[in-house]
Image (spheres, rainbow, N blue to C red):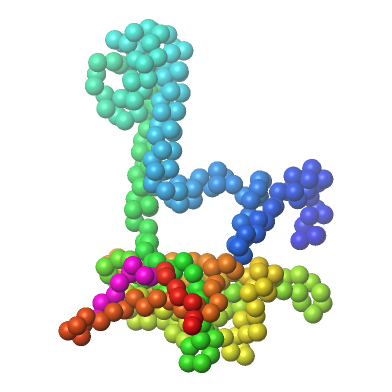
Amino acid sequence: MKIRLKRLSRKQRKRLMPCIHIKVQNGHFEIVGLGAWYSYWRDPYHLLLTIPWSGFLGMIFIFYVAINTVFALAYLVGGDCIANAEPGSFLDFFFFSVQTLASIGYGAMYPKTIYANTIVTIEAMVGLMGIAVMTGLAFARFSRPTARVMFSRVAVITPHEGVPTLMFRTANQRRNTILEAQMRVYLMRDEVSAEGHFIRRFHELKLLRNQTPGFALTWLAMHVIDESSPLYGVTPELLIETHTILMVSLSGIDETVAQVVNARHSYGTHDILWNNRFVDIIHHKPNGDRYIDYKDFHDVLPLD
């Protein structure tokens, strides 16, 4: 990293070095102010695929109005170049641009000069490319496989079979099955190496059951805190001091679309409750049948 920075000019280093800020709150890291290193607007395709539908439609609307405004101004510069349009009327030129961009062509207004025909030709090409791009983006958003997996808001550390065990719950919110589901849990924390260097180290936590042939209802993930566990001997204060985060990654095949889906969640230091247990969500009916009540999915009780 130092060698690369030395090859940059002073102006480049001055622009890059102050840009990175790491905000730490409740064990969660948030990278802000990346400036020249990272910006959503430098990757518009990714931005349009990841923002919510409300933002996507809003950006399309703004872009549509803006491009029609630009062409309306171009027609306005040409003077009386559109037949049956009131000369100098921005609204007439704007709505003519809308008809041209969408290839509607009512025929009430039409170009009558070489200048206007040239602008129409350019706008028609822009309209064709715009429709193709917007169609592709909408299809990509609709066809992207997603999982609806709910994670418990907190994780608990409670005895299980006489051994302290980290637990959290997940639930499939769709009425289908995630086939060959796999779950991995990683612990991230600050550490200092034997040489005295600060590092952010990842540890994989071994689960009692890290895969299931079909994830349809709920899944209680459990990690036994024994001598081999990175959490062995750790206290709540040490978790806060080392900015510990638990990262959960769940993946599998959605049986409906036969594509791989992924879900992830993170638990900060204050999301891990010690000496608590989850409220039971599996209940029995008088006739012996069992049912799941998701009302208590996130609730915990202190140990007696």
- Quarter of the image where the N terminus is located: bottom right
> From the viewer's perspective, is residue 92 above or below residue 41?
above
Q: Is residue 296 magenta?
A: yes
Is residue 218 rendered to the left or right of residue 48? left
123 vs 231, nearest the viewer: 231
From the top left corner, tell me how far across and down residue 252 is, in percent: 39, 73
Q: How many marks?
A: 0
Q: Position of residue 86 (x, y in %)?
A: 34, 8
Residue depicted at 65% across the width and 78% down the height: 235
Which residue is depicted at the point 45% across and 75% down?
301
For the residue pair 111 and 227, the one nearer the viewer reads as 227
Residue 95 seen from this side: yes
The residue under the point 49% across, 77% down is: 302
Q: Residue furthest bottom?
A: 162
Pick the front one: 162 or 91: 162
Name the one closer to the observer, 132 or 134.
134
Instruction: Find the magenta span and give its range.
Output: 290-297
Residue 261, quarter of picture: bottom left
Residue sticking out furthest to the front: 304
Is residue 251 something one can see in this rendering? Answer: no
Can you tell which quarter of the image residue 205 is in? bottom right
In the visual, does 73 lie left or right of 82? right
- Rendered position, 109 above or below 240: above
- Where residue 90 appears, as percent x and y from the top left, is 40, 14
Across and down, in percent, residue 194 comes to: 79, 80
Residue drawn at x 57%, y 86% is 225
Q: Is residue 245 magenta?
A: no
